[in-house]
Image (tube, helix red, strand yellow):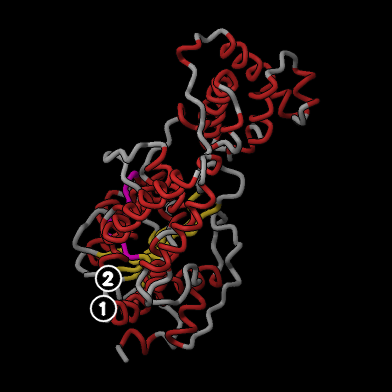
Amino acid sequence: MSKQQKELQNLPHFEVIDSNQQLVKACQQLSQKDAIALDTEFVRERTYFPKLGLIQLYGGENVYLIDPLKLDDFSPFIDLLKNKNVIKVLHSCSEDLDVFQHYFKQMPRPIFDTQIATAFLGLGQSMGLANLLKYYFSIDIDKGATRTNWLKRPLSQFQLNYAAADVWYLLPLYQRIMQDLLQTPWKRAVDFDSQLMIEKKLTIQNPDTAYLSISNAWRLDQAALMRLKLLAKWRFEQAIKCNLPLNFVVREANLWKVANENPTHTSTLLELGFSVQEVRRYGKKILQLLHQATNCDEKYFPPLVINVSKLPYFSKIECKLHQKLKELCPKNLNHELLASRRSLNNFIKWILIKQEDPNFLPDLLRDWRKPYGLKLLDYFHALKQELEECH
């Protein structure tokens, strides 16, 4: 057992960083490490963007708890995030990445997500940190401060201990996971999937294509899609401007109804299910956008949204591909890691709708998945031809 693993039996010792000078010193010390544990605490209940309350760092000595409410120069931390010589170890870090991009415009690179890694070790695809610590170290950690207000000051000793514990345990957990992972062929896959998560976060949503994420957009004709496009773009920009969740501006279902029905009076909005508050705040703007869409030249209408599940033979193709995927998948790997159902559907869309555009390769044809994806692609073409001949 390593020194760090022995120390897990003790409470974490930490230092609160609440001055720019302390931050410089801490980041200089951590920049000398091969790997550091990283976590954040934030509040995100009624806002579009997360509100950062605390940053936790641990390189094997002291845990550093960075108080972002007390600092005004984060350049040392940003430099640490982009230091390619230091692996940033996080657990289930999708929302943490939102924090880094929003506040610092810098993703941590390179990263190692322990939840992704343990999925490749056969421990399940969404194993929580507490369960992993129980599995590897027989340690029970207190999660009592999970739903705390991290923006309130001062933070209690209990809150600080809780925050410090996450990274205190995470670094030795990473070391144990790495020992196991290096006994498998999946280290490269874990690295790629960790970086892929960053890549997808950095895919900036274009306000002009926000309508494509609205449920049932495929049910609308081109004129209604034009209305939906303008409405969805406005809602997206309004949410960012006011820092509100999208549905706090206008609920998605109501946005679709308006695009479909094309009302001309605010009274009709109420009949469609809008709240009085929604109509009072945004009713005139919505009617204005609908009028704008009505006057738009048809040549600017967006193309119909194709629902791949409605394409000929889709259900049979999807079922057969899913079966083939299981056959191709290595026996020691969960086939969901190779391709989730959504990933498989994107693969089918790429073939049937994007016409196998090499500029927009699906996940199944990238990096470690590519050999499996190519076999699945060959199988798809043979299967499609067989189904067409039968009909």
Q: Is residue 118 magenta?
A: no
Front residue of this view, candidates 236 and 301? 301
Q: Which residue is mark 1?
A: 182
Q: Residue at x 32, y 81 (%)?
A: 180
Q: Which residue is mark 2?
A: 187
The answer to whether marks 2 and 1 mark residues whose Cβ atoms lie closer than 8 Å is yes
- Circle 1 sits in a helix, a strand or a loop, which is it? loop
Question: Residue 151: image x %, image y %?
Answer: 54, 54
Q: Is residue 106 magenta?
A: yes
- Circle 2 sits in a helix, a strand or a loop, which is it? helix
Q: In the figure, 166 relative to 316: above or below?
A: below
Question: Residue 215: image x %, image y %?
Answer: 59, 38
Label ID, residue 383 = none
Question: In the image, which residues are magenta?
Answer: 105-112
In this image, 275 relative to 126: left or right? right
Front residue of this view, candidates 274 and 353? 353
Question: Residue 4: image x %, image y %?
Answer: 33, 84
In this image, 56 relative to 284: left or right? left
Q: Residue at x 20, y 58 (%)?
A: 84
**How far is mark 2 from mark 1, CA to CA?**
6 Å
